[in-house]
Image (tube, rainbow, N blue to C red):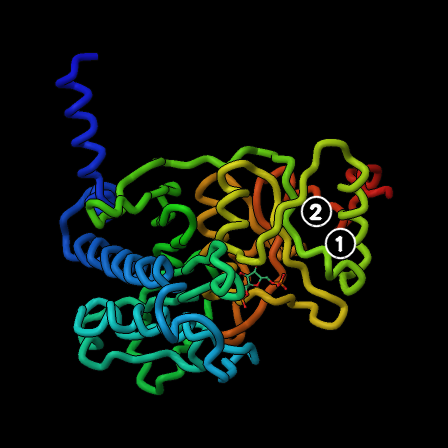
Protein backbone atom coordinates (compact mmCIF):
# COMPACT_ATOMS: atom_id res chain seq x y z
CA UNK A 1 0.00 0.00 0.00
CA UNK A 2 1.43 3.43 -0.92
CA UNK A 3 1.48 6.30 1.55
CA UNK A 4 -0.95 8.11 -0.69
CA UNK A 5 -3.53 5.32 -0.37
CA UNK A 6 -3.13 5.12 3.40
CA UNK A 7 -3.58 8.89 3.58
CA UNK A 8 -6.67 8.70 1.40
CA UNK A 9 -8.12 5.88 3.49
CA UNK A 10 -7.61 7.84 6.72
CA UNK A 11 -9.30 10.86 5.16
CA UNK A 12 -12.23 8.76 3.96
CA UNK A 13 -12.64 7.27 7.42
CA UNK A 14 -12.52 10.66 9.14
CA UNK A 15 -15.17 11.99 6.76
CA UNK A 16 -17.58 9.13 7.44
CA UNK A 17 -19.57 11.08 9.97
CA UNK A 18 -22.88 9.99 11.40
CA UNK A 19 -25.02 12.34 9.30
CA UNK A 20 -23.29 11.27 6.10
CA UNK A 21 -23.70 7.61 7.06
CA UNK A 22 -27.46 8.09 7.52
CA UNK A 23 -27.75 9.53 4.01
CA UNK A 24 -25.67 6.65 2.62
CA UNK A 25 -27.91 4.14 4.40
CA UNK A 26 -31.07 5.68 2.96
CA UNK A 27 -29.47 6.06 -0.48
CA UNK A 28 -31.34 9.30 -0.95
CA UNK A 29 -31.16 13.04 -0.44
CA UNK A 30 -34.95 13.48 -0.29
CA UNK A 31 -36.71 15.37 2.53
CA UNK A 32 -37.17 12.24 4.70
CA UNK A 33 -33.51 11.33 4.42
CA UNK A 34 -32.41 14.90 5.20
CA UNK A 35 -34.73 14.93 8.24
CA UNK A 36 -33.39 11.66 9.61
CA UNK A 37 -29.83 12.74 9.03
CA UNK A 38 -30.52 16.03 10.86
CA UNK A 39 -32.30 14.11 13.64
CA UNK A 40 -29.33 11.84 14.22
CA UNK A 41 -27.09 14.90 14.21
CA UNK A 42 -29.16 16.46 17.01
CA UNK A 43 -29.02 13.24 19.03
CA UNK A 44 -25.26 13.23 18.52
CA UNK A 45 -25.10 16.85 19.72
CA UNK A 46 -27.00 15.91 22.88
CA UNK A 47 -24.53 13.03 23.38
CA UNK A 48 -21.53 15.33 22.99
CA UNK A 49 -22.93 17.82 25.52
CA UNK A 50 -23.64 15.07 28.04
CA UNK A 51 -20.20 13.50 27.49
CA UNK A 52 -18.56 16.90 28.02
CA UNK A 53 -20.35 17.45 31.31
CA UNK A 54 -19.65 13.91 32.52
CA UNK A 55 -15.96 14.27 31.76
CA UNK A 56 -15.69 17.27 34.12
CA UNK A 57 -18.37 16.25 36.63
CA UNK A 58 -15.92 15.63 39.47
CA UNK A 59 -14.49 19.16 39.11
CA UNK A 60 -17.72 21.15 38.91
CA UNK A 61 -20.08 22.24 41.66
CA UNK A 62 -23.69 21.01 41.62
CA UNK A 63 -23.28 18.31 38.96
CA UNK A 64 -23.21 15.10 41.00
CA UNK A 65 -25.68 13.77 43.56
CA UNK A 66 -29.46 13.82 43.91
CA UNK A 67 -31.93 16.64 43.33
CA UNK A 68 -34.14 15.47 46.20
CA UNK A 69 -37.00 14.80 43.74
CA UNK A 70 -38.57 11.51 42.62
CA UNK A 71 -39.45 10.69 39.00
CA UNK A 72 -42.58 9.02 37.56
CA UNK A 73 -40.96 5.62 38.20
CA UNK A 74 -40.66 6.44 41.91
CA UNK A 75 -36.86 6.62 41.61
CA UNK A 76 -34.66 9.31 43.19
CA UNK A 77 -33.63 11.79 40.53
CA UNK A 78 -29.99 12.70 40.04
CA UNK A 79 -28.86 16.14 38.95
CA UNK A 80 -27.26 14.59 35.86
CA UNK A 81 -30.61 12.93 34.97
CA UNK A 82 -32.25 16.37 34.90
CA UNK A 83 -29.39 17.92 32.94
CA UNK A 84 -29.35 15.12 30.35
CA UNK A 85 -33.12 15.29 29.92
CA UNK A 86 -32.99 19.04 29.34
CA UNK A 87 -30.11 18.70 26.90
CA UNK A 88 -32.20 16.48 24.61
CA UNK A 89 -35.09 18.96 24.76
CA UNK A 90 -32.79 21.90 24.03
CA UNK A 91 -31.20 20.03 21.11
CA UNK A 92 -34.60 19.59 19.46
CA UNK A 93 -36.17 23.01 20.13
CA UNK A 94 -36.65 25.03 16.94
CA UNK A 95 -35.39 22.10 14.91
CA UNK A 96 -38.59 21.52 12.96
CA UNK A 97 -37.80 17.83 13.37
CA UNK A 98 -39.77 16.39 16.28
CA UNK A 99 -43.07 17.55 17.65
CA UNK A 100 -42.81 15.47 20.84
CA UNK A 101 -40.21 13.98 23.12
CA UNK A 102 -41.03 11.26 25.62
CA UNK A 103 -38.56 10.28 28.28
CA UNK A 104 -38.08 8.32 31.47
CA UNK A 105 -37.81 11.58 33.35
CA UNK A 106 -41.18 13.06 32.24
CA UNK A 107 -44.61 11.73 33.14
CA UNK A 108 -46.13 13.01 29.89
CA UNK A 109 -44.56 13.71 26.49
CA UNK A 110 -42.99 17.14 26.05
CA UNK A 111 -44.50 18.99 23.11
CA UNK A 112 -42.60 21.54 21.04
CA UNK A 113 -45.54 23.40 19.46
CA UNK A 114 -43.38 25.45 17.07
CA UNK A 115 -42.14 22.19 15.52
CA UNK A 116 -45.52 20.48 15.36
CA UNK A 117 -46.81 21.58 11.96
CA UNK A 118 -43.73 20.06 10.30
CA UNK A 119 -42.05 17.76 12.82
CA UNK A 120 -43.31 14.32 11.90
CA UNK A 121 -41.29 12.33 14.40
CA UNK A 122 -41.26 11.58 18.12
CA UNK A 123 -38.08 11.00 20.05
CA UNK A 124 -38.31 8.47 22.90
CA UNK A 125 -35.30 8.43 25.16
CA UNK A 126 -33.73 7.54 28.46
CA UNK A 127 -31.39 10.52 28.86
CA UNK A 128 -28.98 8.95 31.36
CA UNK A 129 -29.46 5.27 31.90
CA UNK A 130 -27.56 3.67 34.78
CA UNK A 131 -27.18 7.01 36.50
CA UNK A 132 -26.34 5.30 39.81
CA UNK A 133 -22.89 4.87 38.16
CA UNK A 134 -22.39 8.60 37.63
CA UNK A 135 -21.18 9.52 41.11
CA UNK A 136 -18.47 6.85 40.97
CA UNK A 137 -17.25 7.65 37.44
CA UNK A 138 -18.35 4.40 35.82
CA UNK A 139 -20.04 3.89 32.47
CA UNK A 140 -23.50 5.26 31.75
CA UNK A 141 -25.49 5.70 28.56
CA UNK A 142 -28.35 7.40 26.72
CA UNK A 143 -30.90 5.29 24.85
CA UNK A 144 -33.09 6.60 22.03
CA UNK A 145 -35.70 5.60 19.49
CA UNK A 146 -37.36 7.54 16.70
CA UNK A 147 -40.96 6.83 15.77
CA UNK A 148 -43.14 8.51 13.19
CA UNK A 149 -45.95 10.55 14.65
CA UNK A 150 -49.21 9.05 13.47
CA UNK A 151 -52.16 11.43 13.40
CA UNK A 152 -52.33 14.86 14.95
CA UNK A 153 -52.49 13.79 18.63
CA UNK A 154 -54.84 16.71 19.30
CA UNK A 155 -55.78 15.37 22.75
CA UNK A 156 -52.10 15.19 23.70
CA UNK A 157 -52.29 11.59 24.94
CA UNK A 158 -49.69 10.24 22.47
CA UNK A 159 -51.85 7.13 22.00
CA UNK A 160 -50.10 6.48 18.67
CA UNK A 161 -46.93 5.61 20.60
CA UNK A 162 -48.60 2.54 22.09
CA UNK A 163 -47.48 0.25 19.29
CA UNK A 164 -44.97 -2.55 19.00
CA UNK A 165 -41.22 -2.12 18.57
CA UNK A 166 -41.28 -2.90 14.85
CA UNK A 167 -42.66 0.62 14.40
CA UNK A 168 -39.34 2.16 15.38
CA UNK A 169 -37.68 3.93 12.47
CA UNK A 170 -34.32 4.17 14.17
CA UNK A 171 -32.91 3.32 17.55
CA UNK A 172 -29.62 3.36 19.36
CA UNK A 173 -27.56 4.29 22.34
CA UNK A 174 -24.67 6.50 23.32
CA UNK A 175 -22.15 4.89 25.66
CA UNK A 176 -20.15 7.23 27.89
CA UNK A 177 -17.12 5.07 28.64
CA UNK A 178 -13.38 5.47 28.15
CA UNK A 179 -14.45 6.82 24.76
CA UNK A 180 -17.92 8.01 23.79
CA UNK A 181 -19.59 5.69 21.32
CA UNK A 182 -22.83 5.94 19.40
CA UNK A 183 -24.42 2.73 18.13
CA UNK A 184 -27.47 3.02 15.90
CA UNK A 185 -29.68 1.21 13.44
CA UNK A 186 -32.28 2.37 10.96
CA UNK A 187 -33.32 -1.19 10.17
CA UNK A 188 -30.33 -1.74 7.87
CA UNK A 189 -27.75 -3.25 10.18
CA UNK A 190 -26.17 -1.95 13.36
CA UNK A 191 -23.32 0.52 13.15
CA UNK A 192 -20.79 1.75 15.70
CA UNK A 193 -19.36 5.28 15.82
CA UNK A 194 -16.66 6.68 18.09
CA UNK A 195 -16.53 10.32 19.12
CA UNK A 196 -13.25 11.82 17.96
CA UNK A 197 -12.81 14.66 20.48
CA UNK A 198 -10.33 16.48 18.25
CA UNK A 199 -12.94 16.73 15.49
CA UNK A 200 -16.03 16.85 17.70
CA UNK A 201 -17.58 14.28 15.34
CA UNK A 202 -18.78 10.70 15.63
CA UNK A 203 -16.74 8.72 13.08
CA UNK A 204 -17.74 5.29 11.77
CA UNK A 205 -15.75 2.54 13.52
CA UNK A 206 -17.68 -0.67 12.70
CA UNK A 207 -20.25 -1.05 9.94
CA UNK A 208 -22.76 -3.92 10.10
CA UNK A 209 -21.72 -5.20 13.49
CA UNK A 210 -22.60 -8.89 13.97
CA UNK A 211 -23.17 -10.33 17.42
CA UNK A 212 -21.61 -13.81 17.93
CA UNK A 213 -24.19 -16.61 17.63
CA UNK A 214 -23.35 -17.65 21.19
CA UNK A 215 -21.12 -16.38 23.96
CA UNK A 216 -19.86 -17.22 27.41
CA UNK A 217 -20.99 -14.10 29.28
CA UNK A 218 -24.16 -13.91 31.32
CA UNK A 219 -25.15 -10.53 32.68
CA UNK A 220 -27.80 -10.41 35.39
CA UNK A 221 -28.25 -9.00 38.89
CA UNK A 222 -27.92 -12.21 40.90
CA UNK A 223 -28.81 -10.30 44.04
CA UNK A 224 -32.40 -10.90 42.90
CA UNK A 225 -31.93 -14.70 42.82
CA UNK A 226 -34.54 -15.53 45.47
CA UNK A 227 -36.99 -12.96 44.12
CA UNK A 228 -37.08 -14.59 40.64
CA UNK A 229 -39.43 -17.28 39.44
CA UNK A 230 -38.04 -20.83 39.59
CA UNK A 231 -37.29 -21.16 35.81
CA UNK A 232 -34.85 -18.23 35.92
CA UNK A 233 -33.22 -19.66 39.04
CA UNK A 234 -32.90 -22.98 37.24
CA UNK A 235 -31.26 -21.30 34.24
CA UNK A 236 -28.70 -19.61 36.49
CA UNK A 237 -28.05 -22.88 38.38
CA UNK A 238 -27.50 -24.51 34.97
CA UNK A 239 -24.98 -21.78 34.02
CA UNK A 240 -23.12 -22.24 37.30
CA UNK A 241 -22.57 -25.91 36.44
CA UNK A 242 -21.30 -25.26 32.90
CA UNK A 243 -17.57 -24.69 32.49
CA UNK A 244 -16.54 -21.46 30.76
CA UNK A 245 -19.31 -19.01 31.67
CA UNK A 246 -18.36 -15.61 33.13
CA UNK A 247 -20.65 -13.21 34.98
CA UNK A 248 -20.39 -9.52 34.04
CA UNK A 249 -22.82 -6.89 35.36
CA UNK A 250 -22.28 -3.15 35.75
CA UNK A 251 -25.78 -2.03 36.75
CA UNK A 252 -25.98 0.15 33.63
CA UNK A 253 -27.83 -1.40 30.71
CA UNK A 254 -25.97 0.33 27.88
CA UNK A 255 -22.52 -0.85 28.97
CA UNK A 256 -23.73 -4.36 29.71
CA UNK A 257 -25.48 -4.60 26.34
CA UNK A 258 -22.47 -3.17 24.52
CA UNK A 259 -20.29 -5.94 25.93
CA UNK A 260 -22.81 -8.58 24.84
CA UNK A 261 -23.11 -7.05 21.35
CA UNK A 262 -19.34 -7.07 20.89
CA UNK A 263 -18.47 -10.37 22.58
CA UNK A 264 -21.67 -12.43 22.67
CA UNK A 265 -23.64 -13.90 25.57
CA UNK A 266 -26.86 -12.92 27.24
CA UNK A 267 -28.23 -10.08 29.35
CA UNK A 268 -31.26 -10.75 31.54
CA UNK A 269 -33.50 -8.49 33.55
CA UNK A 270 -36.34 -10.90 34.36
CA UNK A 271 -39.43 -10.15 36.37
CA UNK A 272 -39.63 -11.13 39.99
CA UNK A 273 -42.45 -12.89 41.84
CA UNK A 274 -43.46 -9.47 43.22
CA UNK A 275 -42.91 -7.49 40.00
CA UNK A 276 -43.46 -9.86 37.06
CA UNK A 277 -42.74 -7.09 34.53
CA UNK A 278 -39.28 -6.48 35.95
CA UNK A 279 -37.63 -3.07 36.05
CA UNK A 280 -36.80 -1.97 32.53
CA UNK A 281 -39.11 0.27 30.53
CA UNK A 282 -40.31 -0.94 27.16
CA UNK A 283 -40.56 2.13 24.96
CA UNK A 284 -37.30 3.90 25.71
CA UNK A 285 -35.07 1.14 27.12
CA UNK A 286 -35.92 -2.42 26.05
CA UNK A 287 -37.46 -1.85 22.59
CA UNK A 288 -34.67 0.40 21.21
CA UNK A 289 -32.00 -2.00 22.49
CA UNK A 290 -33.93 -4.99 21.07
CA UNK A 291 -34.13 -3.28 17.66
CA UNK A 292 -30.35 -2.75 17.66
CA UNK A 293 -29.47 -6.22 18.86
CA UNK A 294 -31.78 -7.92 16.34
CA UNK A 295 -30.31 -5.81 13.54
CA UNK A 296 -26.92 -7.21 14.59
CA UNK A 297 -28.23 -10.81 14.29
CA UNK A 298 -29.17 -11.19 17.96
CA UNK A 299 -32.43 -12.05 19.68
CA UNK A 300 -34.60 -10.22 22.23
CA UNK A 301 -37.39 -11.81 24.21
CA UNK A 302 -39.59 -11.29 27.23
CA UNK A 303 -39.13 -15.00 27.90
CA UNK A 304 -42.51 -15.82 26.41
CA UNK A 305 -42.69 -13.62 23.30
CA UNK A 306 -40.41 -11.64 20.99
CA UNK A 307 -39.70 -8.32 22.70
CA UNK A 308 -40.39 -6.31 19.55
CA UNK A 309 -43.93 -7.75 19.36
CA UNK A 310 -44.97 -6.32 22.74
CA UNK A 311 -47.62 -3.59 22.54
CA UNK A 312 -47.42 -1.27 25.55
CA UNK A 313 -50.56 -0.21 27.36
CA UNK A 314 -48.97 2.97 28.67
CA UNK A 315 -45.95 5.13 28.02
CA UNK A 316 -43.88 3.96 30.98
CA UNK A 317 -44.74 0.24 30.82
CA UNK A 318 -42.07 -2.17 32.10
CA UNK A 319 -41.06 -5.48 30.57
CA UNK A 320 -38.84 -8.45 31.37
CA UNK A 321 -35.87 -8.55 28.99
CA UNK A 322 -33.71 -11.45 27.82
CA UNK A 323 -31.39 -10.33 25.05
CA UNK A 324 -28.17 -11.18 23.28
CA UNK A 325 -26.71 -13.98 21.18
CA UNK A 326 -29.52 -16.02 19.61
CA UNK A 327 -28.36 -19.38 21.03
CA UNK A 328 -28.02 -18.02 24.57
CA UNK A 329 -31.44 -16.35 24.47
CA UNK A 330 -33.05 -19.53 23.12
CA UNK A 331 -31.49 -21.47 26.00
CA UNK A 332 -33.00 -19.11 28.59
CA UNK A 333 -36.38 -19.38 26.84
CA UNK A 334 -36.15 -23.17 27.00
CA UNK A 335 -36.10 -22.94 30.80
CA UNK A 336 -39.11 -20.63 30.84
CA UNK A 337 -41.14 -22.60 28.29
CA UNK A 338 -39.82 -26.16 28.33
CA UNK A 339 -40.91 -28.31 25.38
CA UNK A 340 -40.28 -32.06 24.92
CA UNK A 341 -37.45 -31.17 22.51
CA UNK A 342 -35.50 -29.18 25.07
CA UNK A 343 -36.57 -31.01 28.24
CA UNK A 344 -33.19 -32.63 28.78
CA UNK A 345 -31.28 -29.38 28.72
CA UNK A 346 -33.54 -27.83 31.33
CA UNK A 347 -32.88 -30.66 33.85
CA UNK A 348 -30.97 -29.16 36.76
P1 LIG B 1 -30.65 3.63 37.10
O1 LIG B 1 -30.69 4.53 35.90
O2 LIG B 1 -31.67 3.99 38.15
O3 LIG B 1 -29.26 3.48 37.66
O4 LIG B 1 -31.14 2.17 36.59
C1 LIG B 1 -30.42 1.55 35.61
C2 LIG B 1 -31.24 0.47 34.98
O5 LIG B 1 -32.46 0.98 34.48
C3 LIG B 1 -30.46 -0.24 33.86
O6 LIG B 1 -29.54 0.59 33.22
C4 LIG B 1 -29.78 -1.39 34.55
O7 LIG B 1 -29.56 -2.49 33.71
C5 LIG B 1 -30.75 -1.73 35.67
O8 LIG B 1 -31.51 -0.55 35.91
C6 LIG B 1 -30.02 -2.12 36.90
O9 LIG B 1 -30.93 -2.43 37.88
P2 LIG B 1 -30.49 -3.18 39.23
O10 LIG B 1 -29.72 -2.16 40.03
O11 LIG B 1 -31.77 -3.58 39.88
O12 LIG B 1 -29.65 -4.34 38.87
Ligand 1 within 8 Å, label 1 CB: no
Query: Residue 251 location in percent, x, y?
Result: 58, 58
Q: To which residue does mark 1 refer? A: 232
**Left or right position of 82 against 327:** left
Residue at the location (35% across, 87% down)?
Answer: 155
Marks 2 and 1: CB-CB under 8 Å?
yes
Res. 315 in view: no
Ligand 1 within 8 Å, label 2 CB: no
**Left or right position of 33 against 59:** left
Query: Residue 116 location in percent, x, y?
Result: 22, 77
Q: Which residue lies furthest to the bottom in this view?
A: 155
Q: In this view, does 319 lie above or below 111?
A: above
* Residue 55: quadrant of the picture: bottom left
Q: In which quarter of the image is the C terminus?
A: top right
Res. 332 mark: 2
Q: Quadrant of the N terminus?
A: top left
Amino acid sequence: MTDYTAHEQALDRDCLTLSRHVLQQLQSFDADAQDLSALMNRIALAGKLIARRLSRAGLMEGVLGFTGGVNIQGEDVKKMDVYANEVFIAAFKQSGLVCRLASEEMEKPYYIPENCPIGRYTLLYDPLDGSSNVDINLNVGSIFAIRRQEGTDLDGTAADLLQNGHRQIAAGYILYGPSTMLVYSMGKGTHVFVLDPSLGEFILAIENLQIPASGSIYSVNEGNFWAWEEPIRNYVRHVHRQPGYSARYSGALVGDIHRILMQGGVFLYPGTQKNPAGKLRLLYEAAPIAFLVEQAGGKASTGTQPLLDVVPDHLHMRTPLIIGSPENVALVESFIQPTPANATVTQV
